[in-house]
Image (tube, rainbow, N blue to C red):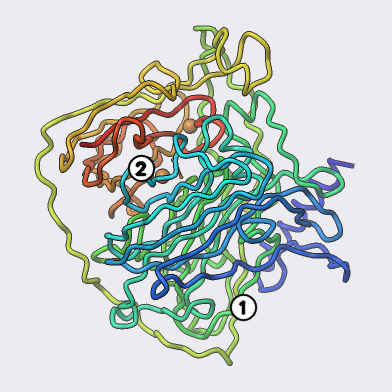
Amino acid sequence: MRQNRRQFLKATAASALCLAGPGLVGRPALASDTVLPAPLATIDATASRAFDLTAIAGETAFVPGVPSPSLGFNQPYLGPIIRVRPGTEVAATVTNRADVPISVHWHGLLVPGDRDGGPHQPVLPGATWRPVLPVSQPPATLWYHTHLHGETAPRVYAGLVGVLIVDDGNDTDRGLPATFGVDDLVLVLQDKRLDAAGRSVYQPGEADRMHGFLGDAVLVNGGLGARFSVPRGLVRLRLVNGANARNFDLAFADGRRFALIATDQGLLPKPPALSRLRLTPGERVELLVDFASGSGATLVSAPHAETKGMMKMGGMMHDMLPLPETFAAPFPVAAFTVDAGLPVAVRSIPDAFDIADEPLPSPAVTRRFVLNDMGMMMGSGAEHGGMGAAALAFGINGRSFAMDRLDAKIALGATERWIVSAEMMGHPFHVHGVRFRVVSENGAAPRPENGGWKDTVFVEGETELLVRFDHPAAAGQPFMFHCHILEHEDLGMMGQFTVG
Ligand code: C2O
Ligand code: CU
Ligand code: CU
């Protein structure tokens, strides 16, 4: 039965891909009495300078008629898209009405460590947290999610994720589409593993902890079979990888090119034209896609193929457990249908943006970080793995994360060279409270996806970064750096640092 359902999902995916037309992505027939995930709400805090998030436990039917337990902010699954304005201070009110402790980390928002929302700032059930968030960075697509140590993967999987947009109000002047929900669309990409009945399950086995948990159904903004109506002109897509572990290797089924206008931390000075890009967990991109011909398009992804063949277990090399990849062929992510009735605001791709390409000073300090698969560790991590005395552990520079250990002390205002390497497989490496440039990847110039200001980068082999530390973090409220495969993060591939 399970096999049948998987085959069904794959067959549906394959036929949608072949036909490449709108409206064919594999959403099963709707039962009329079912509640599907609500579209993401928007909170415009650009003028109000305040927003409320309430974490709740609820139920979400990813497959019609089949509810699964879920968590969300202000709704049963995921949270609202929040828009904030540079130069303002925004008063956030985060209330936890769920039955588990949470936190809210503003991923990519450059705020001091005492309001970053990481593992040292839990919001317990029934409690309210009121951080004031100074917004002091260029426009960008950011996101927020829960971030408690050892509990991030299951709670993000359950739905504690939302999008945060820094919007300076000047996008129309820049020649960019800026009508939210019409030609400026947000797509949160995730995957879910559904059981034979269509319920979402999160029961990671050893292979899932080793590689990260991959689903067999793709969700966009919480829904299967996403479809969007778009105007017959240029459309801006803000893509957020909110999956626990899946890399999306994205292209359009008809091979059309698109402009990459922004990466994690905002607009690129000159947008390159691409026909595919990779988006790994935690990363964001903004694309401009041209629908002027009137024909729709399907965004597809290739299967995840990053894992190398060996891992270390008990100090010895072994074959990796089989990668629990659930797609054998490219699969559809979202379909776009042109609606000639929608207003067209933008017809040509701007060739440059007013973003200063600030040169960074030469770094005074170089640090090396090796992302380690530490194999089976005796006597630690058992609470996560439930395996008794020995459990899978991950670390950085040979040490698994510890809440009470600081891994680096960095001077406020410093620029540092960070050389990050991955031993066994690729890992999306993220740093809190900073933005960085990718200087090189395995000695070569960075891929176009890594050309701008970033806060998360997929490290395969060795990646060299120039990191700018402009935001303070004290010892009790440090910033994190970690792998954004959430199972790896929870199992210890994380460290922490102060800036001051
Ligand atoms: Cu998106 Cu430390 O996380
Ligand atoms: Cu972050
Ligand atoms: Cu990892």
Most foreground residue, 396 or 133: 133
Answer with left or right where residue 105 lies relative to residue 326: left
* Image spot of residue 311 (x, y percent): 52, 18
Q: Circle 2 — which element? A: helix
At a point 22% along the width and 66% down the height, the residue shown is 355
Instruction: Quarter of the image for the N terminus: give it.
Output: top right
Residue at figure coordinates x 83%, y 48% from the top left: 5
Which numbered tag is attached to residue 197? none
Disc 1 residue: CB within 8 Å of ligand 1: no
Tell me the kind of residue under disc 1.
Answer: Thr
Q: Quadrant of residue 352?
A: bottom left
Residue type highlighted by circle 2: Asp
Residue matched to label 2 = 114
Contact between labelled residues 1 and 2, with CB atoms less than 8 Å apart: no
Question: Looking at the picture, does residue 469 appear above or below residue 106?
Answer: above
Q: Secondary structure at mark 1?
A: strand
Residue found at the far front of this picture: 127
Q: Which mark is residue 337?
A: 1
| Residue closer to the observer: 317 or 65 | 65
